[in-house]
Amino acid sequence: MTPKKSVQLSGVVVAESAICSIDPDEGVLMYRGYDITDLAEHSTYEETALLLLDGELPSSEALSVFESELADRGLPAKTAETIDRSAGVAAPMEMLRTAVSTLSFSDPGRGNTDASSARRTATRLIAKLPTIVTRYERRRQGLEPVPPDPSLSYSENFLTMLHGEHPSEREARAFDVAMILHAEHELNASTFTARIVAGTGADLTAAVVAAIAALSGPLHGGANEAAMRMFERWGTPEQTPPEVRAMLERKEKLYGFGHPLYRAYDPRAVILKRISEEFSHEAGEPNWYEITLASEQTVLEEKGLYPNVDLWSASVYRYLGVPTDLFTPLFAASRVAGWSAHVLEQYADNRIIRPSAEYVGEPRREFPAPDRA
Ligand SMILES: CC(C)(COP(=O)(O)OP(=O)(O)OC[C@H]1O[C@@H](n2cnc3c(N)ncnc32)[C@H](O)[C@@H]1OP(=O)(O)O)[C@@H](O)C(=O)NCCC(=O)NCCS
């Protein structure tokens, strides 16, 4: 019997796409033909999102128009109310999928799958997800939500709404880079989910709600939070190698390691690792960086596995003061650009996605007598 692989459909090509390419052996990731290392160095989240949606780097005029559309960050009353009611009871990803669902009640593009409606809805979602996440955080802390400031960039505004104070330039840039690096990643589980939902003719918000649900699991987007929980448990860099070895011995999963595609160092993790190191020096709090580094070295030695994006985003978000259970909602806020690009691509040449299963159950059986016990 062939051993069961831990990733189903691995290596099976199910769609043609012009959005994102990955070289798993060299550890290269490109959005629309641009290396993410260049985007992280020179682009902004707004520009990268537009590149993903439209396929080209925008002119400065097109970017300004998009930025002003993205400045419409306020929430409809129903959405605000949903967040306020769920703040004490719902986990962040439960709240997020519920609140995003309510956005469609007042979306002019509701129910439409034509390119211009879906494109407008995409902009609306990218603009409003940060307001949803940060309103929830402020409410559950018993604080007043910080209203969005349209004069600020996407990332400055996100951090300001989260913390109630303006970030430093360095913090805003680090956050922006993290958002760029999470914006898209080909046919991962949540993006495939979005395309399946879009393929039925459902609208973009429906596809994004389903994608948020898929992202929440610890084998996917939830891995960044799960990685930080491990670091918190280990406590110190010295304690990390024995804890890692013990987990490997017990055949437990180490979150933030391994990848269905990459056989080299995840290029997103390379950049986040550098940012984490810089913050560790600046903040005078090297613990999170050093624990992550010790785990990376031990897993590489013991198992030959590389870290993925979630290992190194965890400490960066911690240095930026993001609560651990908001790591995955942040991932969703960024990835909504990639999900939307894929849904637009799906609509452009749509067919319902309906694979088959190999039946391995009982062969045909007689229905038992009606007087069975
Ligand atoms: C992503 C993932 C499902 C890929 O699994 P995969 O394709 O089976 O991985 P590989 O084929 O490279 O596994 C090689 C070996 O390393 C082990 N391994 C892989 N990832 C591991 C991890 N995170 N922790 C512990 N062991 C792991 C496998 O069990 C396998 O062990 P074996 O040779 O003793 O059977 C897996 O690495 C994982 O669950 N990672 C943790 C979750 C995570 O961080 N997800 C975010 C991905 S961006």
Image (tube, rainbow, N blue to C red):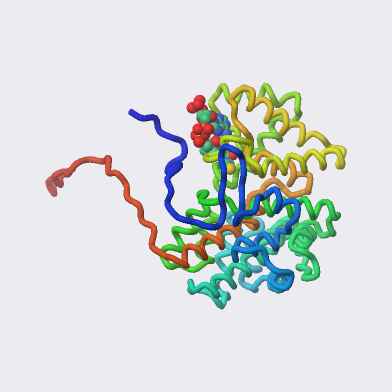
The residue lying at 63 percent from left, 36 percent from top is 265
Residue 329 percent coordinates (x, y): 64, 54
Res 90 seen here: no
Left/right of residue 3 with respect to residue 218 in the rendered view: left
Res 192 seen here: yes
Total labels: the figure holds 0
The residue lying at 52 percent from left, 52 percent from top is 190
- In the image, ligand 1 is in what quadrant? top right
Residue 194 percent coordinates (x, y): 50, 58
Residue 209 percent coordinates (x, y): 53, 60
Q: Nearer the viewer, residue 23 or 281?
A: 23
Q: Nearer the viewer, residue 215 or 22?
A: 22
The residue lying at 70 percent from left, 62 percent from top is 47
Looking at the image, residue 292 lies above or below residue 349 = above
The residue lying at 44 percent from left, 58 percent from top is 196
The image quarter containing residue 81 is bottom right
Q: Quadrant of the C terminus?
A: top left
Residue 362 percent coordinates (x, y): 22, 40
Looking at the image, residue 178 lies above or below residue 337 = above
Looking at the image, residue 62 lies above or below residue 354 = below
